[in-house]
């Protein structure tokens, strides 16, 4: 790991300022992704701007929406009573990320800003129709994830919170990569309060995506049988030693059916 | 049985130290003025080194020295050796290419050691290494053992077609004749997947040179420090043995991978003199462990089994291509030959066997012994083909095995080994009962109702442990004898120190060896300490591998204990003024037959040291004895493992739902420790079968499974709660009757799992690891074929 300048601002404006001044700055939340990449020499920022000083963590769960501040660690989302009651699917998703160390350091803001194609949270953001609140604006979940490891964030823009509307019912089912335990495929299925249905898939493609055919079928009839025959196309899905695109496409259907059956 | 003697479930004495973080591993040790090494490694699978450009360092770079193959040549430091000579069928010796401790002119795998940077700190060494500019000329490479002989890559000049040897064992004519009489022949092509060992503690070394005495010390993560000293002295030519001390302190797991002498440790101890004697520490990063620890397995095999109409085996033929990696590691050559083909008879009376093994170089990390070493590969061949034959002949697989078991002992197989004792029916019958074999059909039907495919698989393994009779292995090409030595030092107060050439790196010797002493001398287990892992303390030793520490190491201790007892009796006789023949020793007390005169063991020890009451011209003062033990035969642990799986048709996920293991290890010193060894071994074997597999990219030669992101170790949740039991036939070749238990689980498990998985799926074979993806592909192919 190369040397870098370390900043720990306590106000978002100072964080943005530090980022503007830096030659090649990086925000850091839990550091669970950033630090390993720096250790491997895959990233060597000149400046680390530690967002921990912003003290921006915590969850508020109300009847209509759950707001998770960007600095909230996965373990806190997983164990929050309000989240468990309002959106159990979200608590379950958070409880299945990595291991206890990762869950007690890694944050929702860092996870979605990083947008790893195999990360879990993007399925929740898109699948539950969430909105990402940043230091500058509100970005609809559907528009936030733009490509593999790419988001709509500007270089000095900081994620400040994610707002999840409370659905009528939802479930997240993950097929972990046998080695890394990231999502080889993860599917969030949600029936929102307005009756619309969302099916969001992470892990399978270069970024999280929705499956409109399934959503339509489920809107007509919210049951696993309704989507039994709907297969996503294998073409364009991820391929590695753990799973071919065909296998991932197959798993999308299996997990979606299981999620529908489990939705509550 | 006393509560700390042989057979007692004594809690491990060493565990308190380990679980409270008080262990002293090599990386925990820091010497005065210590520097740090970082290795520049090859990013290419196969390339010439055109030039190495070393920048001009500034003081703030902290660089103490940079060394390359040129420096190694200048100091005439010898290369790494392979200590077991194998001859090809045509009589020619194996083709061992040079293996310098720092590359000379060429690199042969990704991770090959090119140069070393020694600096004031680890960070500085690593940063400086990144600034060394090595220019490479890429050469064609090959990573697949099956393709090596016909590849365009020429890895070592001495080895045309990348072939190390073409070896055979058994009688070809007799085997062909057996096949010509066959009623049925079963054929199977199988691959034994390459594995990466993954000891919890990465390899590490600290080398230092003492200018005052021209003496070297090496701390290293070794399973056999004396062998390391011998090799570094005799072959690398660094220093004579009395000028080199090797210490292997606490070692956090080895599984074979720490038997070998590696370049990094030799470099650290050699380069210390180059920098004026400051100690040099190197600790592998986990990435380096993946790249540069010796890997295991990597066999591609075609096997055929001939049967008569009753399903009695007439003969076995097999041809194996064994990947050796880019260089021959320390014991690499004996693994796919004498540790493999000699076990191809399994538990069966097979009249004729013929095995051919072609060993090939590939542009990959060297391959050597890994838990089981050759015996898991043999068991996999035998147990997979026996199972397949039973299915093809529509004979119940348990019955098929029963019909073919060796029933009388000693039994001479057609492949060298003489099995001395065993009862294979007993372990099978006990296992069938525990596993409720009769209820399987019902369980399968119940699983089908849940949409699950249930399968059952056997592995009736045998292994050769207690390695090994020196003359026997010598005649087969071994460069060393495989005896063990021990010394028993009784202190004047009656406490006991055992110095052993065995090395504990997880096995629990501090407990089991002390149990033997407690049993024999009747002393409290806490008054016994076990000293090992230091060439300055222990006279000599061959180390720990091949499940030899019990059968060979403890027998050496037992022999030394016999001598201690004999001498103590003499002392006691004098002190108690009785005839030596009237002295009895029981439960730690010496007594005079027919009288009430007695002395405790500690009193006799004190008397031996005080030496007031016996003629020192006849009896030397003190109580300390040593012994060497060379076994007369291998030992043959064997058993029956039965695995039951359920497969999720939708996802291809295999769940192991039941595991029964009935093992015959002869005498069991500590059932709790033995069960732990079996649990760990099975889990490692389940890893090979379901999760682990080393993958190199054929196009680039890069290691794809180079971290835990892609290399999948088994987890606790991957295994069920095991049902273990034992049968016992004593081993006749050692006085304790022990056979060894360290590798059994890893030997039995892969075949048991894969027999169960193929049974569930109704397929002949499936490559390991049977990952969800692999299983799903098989299910998908079956489905497509049905449609
Ligand atoms: C062993 C291991 C296993 C894991 N398993 C999983 C898994 O199963 N599922 C899963 O989803 N994830 C997994 N992760 C990733 C984990 O969830 C990380 O916590 C997460 O990806 C990054 O969060 P962080 O807070 O640590 O971010 P950091 O590492 O601090 O930052 C990550 C990136 O986001 C940027 N960033 C951070 N915070 C902000 C912000 N507020 N605004 C803008 N940009 C920001 C940083 O600049 C950086 O580029 C795993 C990680 C590890 C180490």
Image: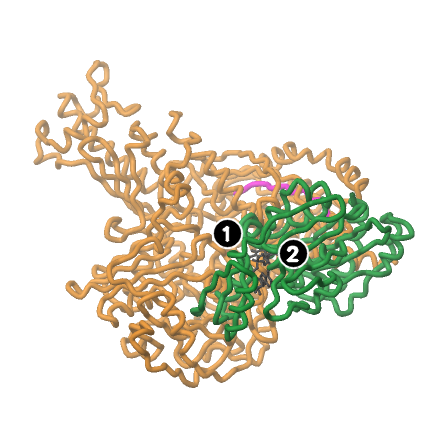
The magenta stretch spans residue B436: no
The chain to which mark 1 is attached is: B
Label 2 CA crowd tier, 10 Å (few <14, some 14–19, many 20+): many
Q: Tell me, by letter, which chain the rendering colours orange.
A: B
- The structure residue drawn at horizontal position 45% and vertical position 69%, both measured from the top left corner, is A4
Would you say residue B297 is visible in this rendering? no
* Quadrant in the picture for the N terminus of chain B: top left
Q: Tell me, by letter, which chain the rendering colours green.
A: A
Q: In this view, does B94 lie above or below B518?
A: below
Q: Image quadrant of ligand 1? A: bottom right
Task: Give the x, y percent position of residue B171.
Answer: 55, 60
Q: Mark 2 points at which residue?
A: A161
On screen, residue A163 versus residue B543, left or right, reads: right
Task: Give the x, y percent position of residue B248.
Answer: 33, 53
| Residue B372 marker | 1
Magenta residue span: B638-647
Nearer to the camera, B364 or B772: B772
Nearer to the camera, B294 or B81: B294
The magenta stretch spans residue B642: yes
Q: In this view, does A200 lie above or below B152?
A: above
Would you say residue B274 is visible in this rendering? yes
């Amino acid at each position: 790991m190369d040397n870098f300048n370390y900043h720990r601002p306590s106000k978002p404006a100072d964080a943005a300022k530090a980022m503007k001044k830096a030659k090649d700055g990086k925000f850091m939340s839990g550091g669970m992704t950033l630090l390993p990449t720096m250790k491997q020499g895959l990233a060597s920022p000149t400046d680390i701007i530690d967002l921990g000083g912003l003290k921006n963590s915590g969850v508020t769960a109300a009847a209509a929406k759950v707001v998770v501040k960007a600095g909230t660690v996965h373990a806190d989302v997983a164990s929050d009573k309000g989240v468990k009651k309002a959106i159990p699917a979200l608590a379950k998703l958070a409880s299945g990320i990595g291991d206890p160390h990762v869950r007690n350091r890694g944050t929702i803001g860092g996870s979605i800003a990083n947008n790893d194609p195999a990360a879990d949270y993007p399925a929740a953001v898109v699948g539950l129709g969430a909105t990402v609140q940043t230091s500058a604006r509100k970005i609809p979940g559907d528009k936030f994830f733009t490509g593999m490891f790419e988001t709509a964030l500007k270089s000095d823009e900081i994620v400040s919170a994610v707002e999840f509307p409370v659905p009528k019912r939802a479930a997240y089912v993950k097929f972990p990569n046998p080695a890394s335990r990231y999502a080889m495929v993860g599917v969030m299925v949600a029936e929102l309060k307005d009756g619309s249905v969302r099916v969001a898939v992470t892990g399978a493609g270069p970024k999280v995506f929705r499956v409109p055919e399934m959503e339509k079928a489920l809107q007509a009839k919210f049951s696993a049988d309704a989507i039994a025959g709907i297969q996503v196309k294998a073409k364009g899905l991820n391929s590695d030693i753990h799973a071919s695109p065909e296998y991932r496409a197959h798993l999308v259907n299996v997990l979606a059916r299981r999620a529908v059956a489990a939705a509550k | 049985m006393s509560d700390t003697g042989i057979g007692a479930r004594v809690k491990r004495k060493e565990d308190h130290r380990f679980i409270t973080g008080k262990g002293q591993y090599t990386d925990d040790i820091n010497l005065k003025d210590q520097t740090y090494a970082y290795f520049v490694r090859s990013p290419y699978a196969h390339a010439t080194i055109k030039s190495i450009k070393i920048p001009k360092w500034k003081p703030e770079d902290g660089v103490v020295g940079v060394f390359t193959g040129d420096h190694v040549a200048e100091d005439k430091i010898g290369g790494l050796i392979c200590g077991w000579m194998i001859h090809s069928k045509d009589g020619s010796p194996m083709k061992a290419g040079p293996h310098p401790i720092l590359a000379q002119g060429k690199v042969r795998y990704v991770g090959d050691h090119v140069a070393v940077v020694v600096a004031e700190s680890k960070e500085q060494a690593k940063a400086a290494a990144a600034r060394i500019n090595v220019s490479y000329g890429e050469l064609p490479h090959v990573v697949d053992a099956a393709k090596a002989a016909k590849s365009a890559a020429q890895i070592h000049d001495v080895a045309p077609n990348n072939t190390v040897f073409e070896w055979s064992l058994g009688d070809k004519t007799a085997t062909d004749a057996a096949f010509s009489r066959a009623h049925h022949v079963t054929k199977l092509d199988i691959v034994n997947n390459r594995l990466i060992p993954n000891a919890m503690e990465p390899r590490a070394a600290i080398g230092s040179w003492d200018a005052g005495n021209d003496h070297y010390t090496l701390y290293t993560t070794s399973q056999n420090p004396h062998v390391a000293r011998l090799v570094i002295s005799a072959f690398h030519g660094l220093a004579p043995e009395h000028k080199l001390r090797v210490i292997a302190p606490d070692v956090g797991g080895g599984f074979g991978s720490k038997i070998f002498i590696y370049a990094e440790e030799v470099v650290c101890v050699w380069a210390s003199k180059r920098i004026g004697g400051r100690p040099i520490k190197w600790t592998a990063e986990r990435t380096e462990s993946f790249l540069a620890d010796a890997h295991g397995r990597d066999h591609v095999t075609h096997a055929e089994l001939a049967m008569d109409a009753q399903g009695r085996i007439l003969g076995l033929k097999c041809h194996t291509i064994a990947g050796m990696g880019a260089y021959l590691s320390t014991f690499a050559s004996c693994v796919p030959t004498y540790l493999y083909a000699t076990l191809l008879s399994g538990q069966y009376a097979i009249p004729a066997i013929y095995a051919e093994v072609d060993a090939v170089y590939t542009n990959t990390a060297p391959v050597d012994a890994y838990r089981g070493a050759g015996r898991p590969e043999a068991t996999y061949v035998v147990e997979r083909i026996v199972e397949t034959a039973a299915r093809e002949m529509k004979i119940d697989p348990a019955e098929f095995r029963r019909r073919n078991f060796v029933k009388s002992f000693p039994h001479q197989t057609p492949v060298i080994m003489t099995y001395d004792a065993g009862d294979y029916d007993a372990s099978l019958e006990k296992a069938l009962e525990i596993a409720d074999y009769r209820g399987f059909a019902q369980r399968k039907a119940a699983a089908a109702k849940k949409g699950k495919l249930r399968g059952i698989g056997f592995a009736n393994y045998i292994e050769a442990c207690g390695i090994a009779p020196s003359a026997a292995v010598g005649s087969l090409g071994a460069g060393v004898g495989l005896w063990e030595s021990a010394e028993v030092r009784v202190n004047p107060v009656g406490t006991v120190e055992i110095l052993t050439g065995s090395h504990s790196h997880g096995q629990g010797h501090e407990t089991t060896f002390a149990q033997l002493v407690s049993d024999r001398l009747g002393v409290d287990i806490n008054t016994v300490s076990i000293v090992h892992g230091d060439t300055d303390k222990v006279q000599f030793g061959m180390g720990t591998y091949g499940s030899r520490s019990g059968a060979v190491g403890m027998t050496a201790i037992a022999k030394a204990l016999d001598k201690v007892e004999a001498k103590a009796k003499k002392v006691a006789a004098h002190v108690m003024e009785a005839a030596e023949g009237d002295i009895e020793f029981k439960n730690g007390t010496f007594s005079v037959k027919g009288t009430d005169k007695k002395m405790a063991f500690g009193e006799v020890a004190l008397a031996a040291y005080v030496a007031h009451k016996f003629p020192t011209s006849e009896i030397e003062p003190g109580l300390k004895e040593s012994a060497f033990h060379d076994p007369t035969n291998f030992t043959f642990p064997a058993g029956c493992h039965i695995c039951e799986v359920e497969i999720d048709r939708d996802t291809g996920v295999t769940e192991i739902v039941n595991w029964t293991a009935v093992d015959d290890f002869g005498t069991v010193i500590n059932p709790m420790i033995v069960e732990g060894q079996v649990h760990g071994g099975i889990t490692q074997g389940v890893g090979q079968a379901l999760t682990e597999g080393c993958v190199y990219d054929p196009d680039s030669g890069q290691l794809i499974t180079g971290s835990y992101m892609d290399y999948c170790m088994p987890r606790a949740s991957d295994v069920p709660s095991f049902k273990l039991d034992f049968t016992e036939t004593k081993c006749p070749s050692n006085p304790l009757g022990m056979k060894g238990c360290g590798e059994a689980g890893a030997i039995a498990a892969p075949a048991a799992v894969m027999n169960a998985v193929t049974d569930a799926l109704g397929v002949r074979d499936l490559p390991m690891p049977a990952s969800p993806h692999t299983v799903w592909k098989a299910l998908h192919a079956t489905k497509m074929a049905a449609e």
